[in-house]
Image (cartoon, rainbow, N blue to C red):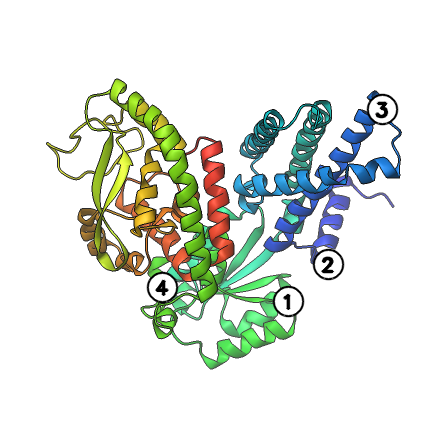
Amino acid sequence: MSVSLPAFTHKIKQWLVDRRFAIALPERRALLVIGDIIIVNLSVLVALRIWAWRGRIPFDRSFLVTQIEWFVALTTLWLVLAWAADLYDVAMAGRLPEMAQRVGGVGGGQLVLYLVVFFLSPRDVLPRLFFLYYLVISIPAVLLLRWAYASFITRSVFRQRLVIVGAGWAGRTIADAVRTYASQDYSLVGFVDDDPARAQENTDDLPVLGTTADLPNLVRQRKVDGVVVAISGQVRANLFQALLDCQAAGIPVIRMMTLYEALTGRLPVEHVRNDWLLPSAVEGGQSPLAYRLFVSLLDWGFGLIGGALLLLVGPILALLIKLDSPGPIFYRQVRLGRGGVPFELFKFRSMVADAERETGPQWAALDDPRVTRMGRFMRVTRLDELPQIINILRGDIHLIGPRPERPEFIAELEQEIPFYRARLAVKPGLTGWAQVKYRYGSTIEDALVKLEYDLYYIKNRSVMLDLSILLKTIGVILLFKGT
């Protein structure tokens, strides 16, 4: 009996769905990392083989042992630069044009670092052709891996199927977040809600499939991989039992805020409870001692290195600023620090002198006409912020933290945005989570999104998060994505 190709394809897809081939976000990120490690090491191996062949060197075990440092060094360098360039951002992995640009940036970063070490090293210590072979092999190979990921892993049969409990504000918010940040990773099946008024509605083009009493059967019938709880207030007994039944069947139950944080790196302000910061307050508002020591070492280490850099390039930048436009070299502005304590922030002047004399305090726009030619260059490279090393050494700010804001804007924003003053619970920083995750902001809507990133940082501060921000800041500078 003959079977048509569409029917055969449908059967194959159904077979895959029935066996739950869904891949979770951590597993997808692990696939990208492991794939890169394999590609980089194979590229090193092939490059060494070509180098040995051209140099008439025996390619045997003893030769590979003498070159083992290249496997370790280039793999480590690739992973660090790739993390800084967001190559392991699952939401971005399916966008091939942007991913290709970032892979090229990582290759360029490796080349620049290699050339710096090459010219500072004694003659003939580092091989030139080997590294060229490695780049020529590894960059196309990684691009091919990313193409394979975007072409196959993002297909519907590998997506996790989610049901959202609660079709109100929280449910719609997480549905929007899934569609915006993880449409290639999750498929939304629909909502479950006990409100009779929503029973026959399609909320955000998603159907309300039934009530909480129907949840265990819906999960089984619809081949659901996860249940997202997006309700406000107390969980009632019948819902609690339904969720327990889902967990007993091996289906993960996920809180809306947990998934939202994982997808966006933000805290949804409207869904944050009034006591979200209380655990820190109970501990006296103090971070663990090891973390505070790490922050101090990071601040002083960067302060000393950055201070030397400021002394080296500062005079050159000062001359260029003076030649480009009349006015002072440095720009001082009052900002609010931890607890709302004001301090003076130092920057290289990037705007025309007295830019706010006629208008008063204004939001800076992305293509602000007040910015000078030299100012645009310094903003893209973040060189205008180099004098803030003085603020770090004085203790006004950390290297990493929410960016300090002007008191005029804070007074305006805290009237419009809930929890805005919560940013002042920690000391501000030269760079922060909002700066590496979000574009330049000049509106109240942008301030709301940046606040969500800042609240996420305040809630999740750690050594690993700070190191991630530091690496991503380096990526922003290397890719000239500063503003």
Give the residue pinned by disc 3: 53
The Cα atoms of the two marked residues, 2 and 4, are separated by 37 Å
The amino acid on which the numbered mark 3 sits, given as a three-letter code, is Trp
Q: Residue furthest top?
A: 323
Q: Is residue 162 above or below residue 13?
A: below
Q: Is residue 179 visible?
A: no
Q: Quadrant of residue 385?
A: top left
Type of amino acid under label 1:
Arg
- Mark 1 to mark 2 CA distance (whole Å): 12 Å
Amino acid carrying label 2: it is Arg
Q: Mark 4 points at which residue?
A: 272
Q: Are marks 3 and 2 in contact (CB under 8 Å)?
A: no
Q: Is mark 2 on a helix, strand or loop?
A: loop
Q: Residue 210 carries which label?
A: none
Above-or-below relation of 380 to 88: above
The mark that comes first in sequence, 4 or 1, is 1
